[in-house]
């Protein structure tokens, strides 16, 4: 009896909890020759970060770390957008528990990428505002397509990016430039981002961006991987320590802020405007 039940489960693909009814929103492809993994965000039209995308992103990072890939390139399957940041629809008109889950998974995804011991690079093949910029700046290297926008525009939305969320941004920009950009909620064009050091190179196509990212990861071929990763993590240790100290309180702060009536109202107006703009 037990045996036949097991056989039935195997035939159906295993116990139910492993039978996901939804498709994964990220994919991983490892290049046989280079051993470099490309992790693609695939939630059209704009890769807005809902809980599932954030959970899938963590699982793909885990997969890449355990399959002994030589490095990780993060990119997008959407033609003009790397990621539009947090899914505002998911944060709108919802309950506190959902808000708690959204923020916890954003934190988890960020720390998985920022704290990865692997060499990481972002092939930014489209716009990367807010949470999109967060993921790109969690990586060690950025290559971006021309005439797109990147930055932390939170103040333009009337919200505040917490300190940990600025860590990657502050790693690559001088304090003065970062402070001005964050207080203005500035989105940089690719060309401005290159001039300031927010991105490292420009590429004309996604393929070229992937090649440049692979070349960056390839630059570590002759470096001892353990020495490399420990050195990287020493640079990031202070930010990670600060983040770990406040991560629980940070979730509650977010829930309190995002559930305020005036913030919810702002989200509704912002969503309406986004929709109006996309219909034009
Ligand atoms: C706004 C208030 C948020 C309040 C949060 C409260 C507390 C938070 C405290 C701190 C948080 C900081 C951390 C991070 C925050 C974020 O990430 S918030 C998200 C910020 N993102 C943006 O401002 C980007 C908004 N999107 C755009 O500017 C553009 O869509 C684009 C990325 C430049 C791409 O342009 P385009 O290719 O022209 O695509 P469309 O604009 O036509 O969009 C297509 C459809 O996608 C919908 N959409 C776009 N972005 C989002 C999004 N972030 N969430 C949900 N949905 C989004 C858009 O409405 C279109 O939908 P329809 O086709 O009309 O149905």
Image: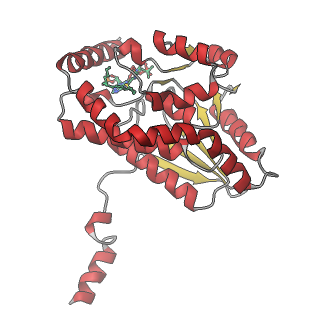
User: Residue at 40% across / 14% down in the picture?
Assistant: 155
| Quadrant in the picture for the N terminus | bottom left
Residue 85, visible in the rendered structure: yes
Q: Would you place residue 233 above or below residue 103 in this image?
A: below
Q: Would you place residue 19 above or below residue 228 in this image?
A: below
| Quadrant in the picture for the C terminus | top left
User: Residue at 63% across / 26% down in the picture?
Assistant: 172
User: Residue at 44% across / 29% down in the picture?
Assistant: 131
Q: Residue 278 location, x and y as percent? A: 36, 17
User: Residue at 50% across / 37% down in the picture?
Assistant: 77
In the picture, measured across the screen, residue 251 lies left or right of residue 78, that is left
In the picture, measured across the screen, residue 124 lies left or right of residue 156, that is right
Q: Residue 276 location, x and y as percent? A: 30, 13
Q: How is the image coloured?
A: secondary structure
Q: Would you place residue 188 above or below residue 9 in this image?
A: above
Residue 83, visible in the rendered structure: no
In the picture, measured across the screen, residue 13 lies left or right of residue 136, that is left
Q: Residue 251 location, x and y as percent? A: 31, 37
Ligand 1 in which quarter:
top left
Q: Quadrant of residue 124?
A: top right
Q: How many marks?
A: 0
Q: Nearer the viewer, residue 260 or 198?
A: 260
Q: Residue 45 location, x and y as percent? A: 40, 31
In the picture, measured across the screen, residue 162 lies left or right of residue 4, that is right
């Amino acid at each position: 009896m037990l045996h036949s039940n097991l056989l039935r489960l195997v035939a159906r693909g295993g116990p139910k909890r492993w039978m996901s009814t939804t498709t994964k929103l990220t994919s991983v492809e490892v290049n046989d020759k280079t051993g470099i993994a490309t992790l693609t965000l695939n939630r059209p039209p704009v890769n807005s970060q809902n809980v599932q995308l954030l959970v899938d992103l963590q699982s793909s990072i885990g997969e890449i770390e355990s399959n002994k890939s030589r490095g990780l390139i993060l990119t997008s399957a959407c033609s003009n957008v790397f990621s539009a940041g947090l899914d505002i629809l998911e944060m709108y008109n919802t309950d506190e528990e959902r808000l708690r889950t959204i923020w916890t998974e954003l934190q988890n995804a960020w720390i998985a990428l920022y704290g990865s011991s692997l060499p990481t690079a972002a092939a930014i093949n489209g716009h990367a505002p807010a949470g999109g910029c967060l993921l790109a700046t969690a990586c060690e290297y950025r290559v971006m397509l021309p005439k797109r926008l990147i930055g932390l525009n939170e103040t333009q939305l009337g919200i505040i990016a917490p300190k940990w969320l600025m860590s990657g941004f502050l790693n690559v920009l001088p304090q003065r430039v970062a402070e001005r950009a964050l207080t203005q909620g500035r989105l940089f064009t690719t060309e401005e981002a290159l001039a300031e050091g927010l991105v490292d190179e420009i590429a004309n196509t996604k393929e070229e961006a992937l090649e440049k990212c692979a070349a960056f990861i390839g630059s570590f071929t002759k470096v001892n991987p353990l020495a490399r990763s420990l050195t990287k993590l020493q640079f990031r240790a202070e930010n990670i320590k600060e983040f770990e100290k406040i991560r629980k309180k940070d979730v509650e702060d977010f829930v309190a802020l995002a559930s305020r009536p005036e913030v919810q109202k702002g989200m509704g107006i912002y969503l309406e405007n986004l929709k109006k703009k996309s219909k034009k």
